[in-house]
Amino acid sequence: MKQLAIIGGGPAGISAALYAVRGGAEVTVFAKDGGALEKADRIQNYYGFEHGVAAKELIAAGVRQAQHLGAAVKHAEVFGVEFAEGGFRIKTADGAFDAGAVIIACGTARNAPPIKNLQTFEGAGVSYCAICDAFFYRGKKVAVVGSGAYARSEYAELKNVVKDVTVLTDGGGALDGIPCNTKKIAAFEGEHKLESIVFADGSRENFDGAFIACGSAGAFELAKKVGLEIGGGKLLVNEKRETNVPGIYAAGDCTPGLQQIAKAVCDGMTAGTEALKYLKAQDLKP
Ligand SMILES: Cc1cc2nc3c(=O)[nH]c(=O)nc-3n(C[C@H](O)[C@H](O)[C@H](O)COP(=O)(O)OP(=O)(O)OC[C@H]3O[C@@H](n4cnc5c(N)ncnc54)[C@H](O)[C@@H]3O)c2cc1C
């Protein structure tokens, strides 16, 4: 059976791993950190803990349980998901990983910075996916907005196709070996599409496009890369936690519904069992 890749090591991703690995799948979980529960203190409303449980311990115990059952849990930031022969390719700082099915369980964060008019120009110069949209900017001048490893990865994608690419770190530190402007950004401007970027010091520079790559890629950015349907900022799924792309599932806070551990665990259970069925069915195909 092909591998199952799970992006996210919170309650949704780890619950999916438990069900899939116990059903016989080879599972790799990619998690850049402990997710929402890293910010929480004691959890009083999760089943089975009479006196509550420390949020960090709940996460750590889940990870240990998944590892004990045979899942690989990698501490790694995922930059992208792509279609590949026989399934999907997960891109991380440590290299690429091929999988037959993917579960996105990245939690809620959407990394749009608070720049004036950014939303106005989404789809009209503002993009969240270099690999999807770079082609439209051949011969033009674009910016990548961000200052971390994800911005570096989006820069590398664009540089293959677009001649003039500058990273705008929006007040963050410069990235070694890449043309950067570290000024704070105030606003995007243009008539019907993005034409220029105005900085906090009053200066401005003309750009044809801006690719947003702040922080890490979240569910929204990963979804854009493979054309997943989004509604109200969440990944849209059916009752089997299937997205509109066969073989890609989504679970937990990145999908509609209550943002609670119990719901994330339930979603993970469904996504894990359905992804397992999908992988088994792929094996039977001639
Ligand atoms: C302060 C606070 C208190 C809370 N208290 C409660 C409570 O008392 N009871 C309750 O039921 N719920 C509570 N919640 C909500 C609960 O934490 C979430 O509903 C739950 O954690 C959602 O699980 P998830 O797996 O969907 O997402 P998360 O737990 O957020 O996990 C997301 C995972 O995705 C990973 N990830 C994201 N992007 C990438 C990437 N690009 N590459 C690799 N990994 C990535 C993260 O590192 C993380 O491992 C609280 C939340 C907060 C913030």
Image: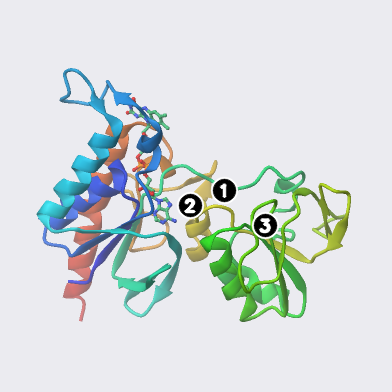
User: Quarter-wise, where is residue 197 in the image?
Assistant: bottom right
> Which quadrant of the rendered structure holds the C terminus?
bottom left
Residue placed under numbered mark 1 in the picture: 111
Residue placed under numbered mark 2 in the picture: 218
From the viewer's perspective, is residue 169 above or below residue 12?
A: below
Horizontal arrangement in the rendering, residue 90 relative to residue 204 (left or right) = left
Q: Quadrant of ligand 1?
A: top left
x, y (%) of residue 98? 32, 73
x, y (%) of residue 46? 24, 26
x, y (%) of residue 35? 38, 43
For this rendering, which residue is in front, 7 or 25?
7
Residue 258 in sight here: no
Circle 2/circle 1 CB separation < 8 Å? yes
Who's the residue at 29% across and 36% down the image?
56
Residue placed under numbered mark 3 in the picture: 169
Residue 98 in sight here: yes
